[in-house]
Amino acid sequence: MARRDPHSYADDTQAETESFHLVGRLDFANRILRAEVTLRFRDLASGTLDLDTRDLAIETIRDDAGRVLPFTLHPAEPIFGSRLEVELSGGTRAISIRYRTSPDASALQWLAPAQTAGGKLPFLFSQCQAIHARSVIPLQDTPRLRVTYTAELTVPKALRVVVAAAAVGSRRTEGELATERYEMPQPIPPYLFAFAVGDLVSQALSPRSAVWAEPSVLAKAAYEFAGVEAMIVAAEKLFGPYDWERFDILTMPPSFPYGGMENPRLTFLTPTLLAGDRSLVGVVAHELAHSWTGNLVTNANAEHFWLNEGFTVFAESRILEATDGPDVAQLDAALGRKELDQALARFATRPALTKLRTHLAGIDPDDAFSQVPYEKGYFFLRALEETIGREAFERWLQSYIAAFRFGAIVTEDFLAHFEAAHPGVLAKVGASRWIDGEGLPADAPVPRSEKLDAVQAAGVAVPDPSLARTWSPVEWQLYLEAGTRPIEVCKQLDATYQLTNSTNYEVLVSWLALALRCGYLDVIPRVEEVLASVGRMKYLRPLYTALRDVDRVRATSVFAANRASYHPIGRQMVAGLLGV
Ligand code: BES
Ligand code: ZN
């Protein structure tokens, strides 16, 4: 037996899935997907096959010869879920599994009409990274094994289905139901399987890009993300051709737990990016960058997550530099450094999670999640770049992407590739301190820009309006993240700049968390408003932490009032930090 992914039952010595075909019907009343999935193997298979499942009810399993196959659904293990052990008869090309999901499927959030912008129709979306695909489909849920797929989903006809894949044919309606078909011709790791169902409409942004949203949100989203084609053009120049044909965007309901998710052909984005001034589109650049780093070159398991995210923060920075200039990229990097320092502080008691290459046996990837792989990864790559020079690094990055495209790699593969291209450089920058060491090496690169100096010069005093009126949201955030200040300063800041009324979520959340830490409790109603309307974990974490530290009882009651509307992953995170 050879299990190479600490979070999957997938076994090296068994059959490998090459593609799957999913046919399913979504039951909104009961919050269940009833489906049949056909797993097709790379080679003729026999013997035992272990699949990953979580909270699935398995009905029958047949092979391509129509034989009913014996199976055992083992009891659920922590983190993994239940191993589904199937006995193949031999000479088996494919198996078909009839099953249904649980209303509590960890990858699915079923929203009541009241949780949508329109308020009239329900909404459903999936979020499979890192190991939640198994709660929607029984499969080998490891990014080491890429699959192509087709999906055919039937829903009430008032709703639209979008899948992170290519639409095939046109929508078929029959009675009260509609069926839509999709096909994913490029092989993907299972965590990139994604779909959503709701009252959705789209608007073109460029010949290869469109934005989807609920009707009342569409115009705002189209305005906000209008610059996407310029980003794709910049990215292709930097990293090579865009391999996924289309780059569409789905504007999610507010409970979406992440800022963005790089589902291929259909990036999912939080509606908190809709600031009205295009100031938060760094997240679009980030998810686009994953089209190369992450979706083409994929971490073989969650222990090498930094290969996905560190590279993507680096690539995102390059795209932003090309579209918005070096100051913007440097200010973002400086903010990243602050977020990194906060993450390192949060993991003070679990320092092993501050290594780039982590050891996650017995650890849920959702619990290990932090800004460390993102920002420490970014600064490590920047250290390499500063050592060999920008042009050489850019050339190397392109060769790395070309070498591993549509592959799954571990940290050692990256190291070997870099060492071959630039012998001795890894040793010179002390790569092993970055990869296997805790915390951040003292000689880490430092972001630089005049604008950054100006923000830093403001310190924690109330900034002069002549300066602050010129600040972009990132500059405001850098100022607000500079440390606590006397409550009088907070009051004066709010009186002068109306921060509590800010509609830019990045600025607003930095401000509210700071205000709570400074004891300026007048902001609590606004904090409660945000916690009642948004489920993005990046905002839940600092706000609940700060609220807990000033008023634990209140934090707990706010959570009790809102927990049902949060995504299961967000709920788990907040419950953990409140100890409830
Ligand atoms: N792939 C991640 C989101 C993710 C990571 C989901 C791990 C589940 C498990 C996505 O690309 C991401 O990094 N999103 C960031 C945005 C960003 C600009 C750093 C986020 O959600 O904040
Ligand atoms: Zn990312």
Image (spheres, rainbow, N blue to C red):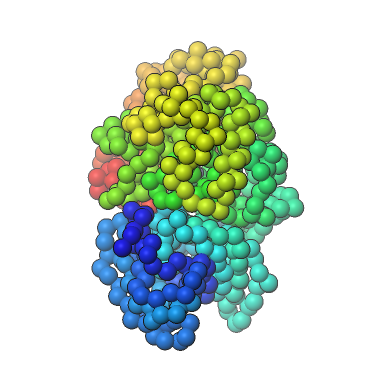
Q: Up-down: is 571 above or below 1?
A: above
Residue at horizontal 49 percent and vertical 16 percent from the top: 456
**Number of marks in the image?**
0
Between 438 and 321, which is closer to the camera in this rendering?
438
Between 313 and 207, which is closer to the camera in this rendering?
313
Between 301 and 56, which is closer to the camera in this rendering?
301
Q: Up-down: is 89 above or below 444?
A: below
Q: Position of residue 426 (x, y in %)?
A: 46, 29
Q: Position of residue 328 (x, y in %)?
A: 60, 27
Q: Quadrant of residue 468?
A: top right
* Res. 137 visible in picture: yes
Residue at horizontal 43 percent and vertical 20 percent from the top: 443
Q: Position of residue 391 (x, y in %)?
A: 63, 28
* Res. 55 visible in picture: no
Q: Is residue 173 left or right of residue 9?
A: right
Q: Is residue 516 left or right of residue 408?
A: left
Q: Is residue 202 left or right of residue 135?
A: right
Between 276 and 325, which is closer to the camera in this rendering?
325
Residue at horizontal 57 percent and vertical 69 percent from the top: 150
Q: Up-down: is 453 above or below 296?
A: above
Q: Position of residue 235 (x, y in %)?
A: 65, 40
Q: Quadrant of the N terminus?
A: bottom left
Q: Is residue 160 left or right of residue 145?
A: right
Residue at the right extreme, as displayed? 207
